[in-house]
Image: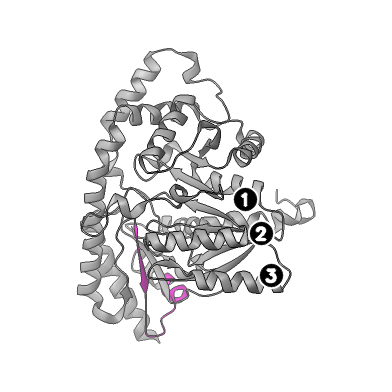
Amino acid sequence: MTTPDRYLSRAAMGFQESAIRAAGVLSARVPDLVSFAAGSPSPDLFPWDDLERVAADLLRSRDPAVLQYGATRGYRPLVEAIVTRLASAGVAVSHEMCVVTTGSQQGLDLAGRVLLDPGDVVLVELPTYSGAIAAFHNLQAALVGVAQDDDGMNPEALEEALVRLAREGRRARVVYLTPNFQNPSGLLMSLARRRALLAVAARHDLIILEDDPYGSLYFEDSATAADTRPLKADDTEGRVVYLGSISKTLVPGFRVAWLVAPPAIAARVELAKQAADLCSGVFDQRVVHRTLADGIVDRLAPGLRQAYQARRTTMEESLTAALGTRVAWRRPRGGFFLWVRLGDGRQADRLFPIALEHKVSFVTGAAFHVDGGGGDYVRLSFSAPTPARIREGVARLAAAIAHYDDGV
């Protein structure tokens, strides 16, 4: 039975679908598809044997707490491990500042619920993560885009946007940033730029929501751990809310992530989470804690960096060989994505159905823009396909572009 619209709230009537999920639904209908759409880790890099051992040990213990409800803040030993790991990255936090969330996506939603009223402005990068766009949109926030350059969000452009909003009588509350290998652009924000943005936030009394799922996936031919120092590490005023995750460095299915905020904000996030799910999956948290405590995540990290760096290079070399200078991109120094400009007036939304006919998919650039832009860009994810499938997928994409050009 279809639910009549008259029963839905105004907020529900405006809910926005994830563009990435929508692309995935369409792609799933195509047999033998090479998907460059989903930003998923590669399953052939999952530590199957380690996880089997850890899970078996936990279940063999017959400890009721392993399968029982848990604390809303999270499994205490896991929280302690997160605090220790953040300290090694220069982020000094206490247990009272940390809340375990069911994936970073829940962290975005909970932070928005605590920090935003309907109509409040969230300033985001152009482009920005489509999941964040959906989360803030569904909370009835207004999203305003700020231009990026090679170093990340432009501080002067941010200042100009804030002045314009103040003149219009609109309240800007939050700046959302992904400084490390941003989804979708792959940009690594310079340390000087991070500090400049912190200074702008201080002058205008803004909260920075820092999303950091890719920070440890730097490519050792062009970046180091020092380049990915979180903004939170230089936050002396308690105005950065930091989101981290295990999804890209262990496995995404556990849905274990964390939010770090000043104690007063973290306490409200805890209350919002109680209403949302009571607690994140306890068994998942126990497994993740053991992988951290046993050094599994740290042991995996170099191999992940090497594998994803090789896949990035394979995609770049394949694009160059198949398309030459007809498309362009900025080389990512880490993460999962190439942000590719199609050029010559090509539009991604028109290319997409042709690409599906050629059994290859991507996410259109407009999905990552809040200003109507991005129509001539596509996001290509190199993380999940094998190198052989990347080469095949790029060949199919080149054929789709040739088909598109012939039809213009």
Q: Secondary structure at mark 1?
A: helix
Q: Compared with residue 6, is residue 187 higher up or lower down, i.e. above or below?
A: below
Where does residue 263 sit, x and y in percent of width and height? 59, 37
Tag 3's secondary structure? helix
Circles 1 and 2, Cβ within 8 Å, touching? The answer is yes
Q: Residue furthest top?
A: 62
Dot 2: few (<14), some (14–19), or many (≥20) neighbours within 10 Å?
many
The amino acid pointed to by label 3 is Ala
Of the 4 image quadrants, the one containing the C terminus is bottom left
Side of 169 where 94 appears, left or right: left
Q: Nearer the viewer, residue 364 or 162?
A: 162
- Residue 166's label in the rendered image is 3
Q: Residue at x 74, y 69 (%)?
A: 169
- The residue sitting at 29% across, 53% down in the picture is 218
Image quadrant assignment for residue 254: top left
Q: Is-magenta flag for residue 336?
A: yes
User: Could you tell whether 124 is left or right of 292 in the image?
Assistant: right
Callout 2 secondary element: loop
> Magenta span covers which residues?
335-352
Q: CA distance from mark 2 to mark 3?
A: 16 Å
User: Which dot marks residue 10?
Assistant: none
Q: Amino acid at mark 2?
A: Ala
Tell me the residue that label 2 is attached to: 141
Of the two numbered discs 1 and 3 on the same chain, state the one appearing first in sequence: 1
Is 104 one of the magenta-colored residues?
no
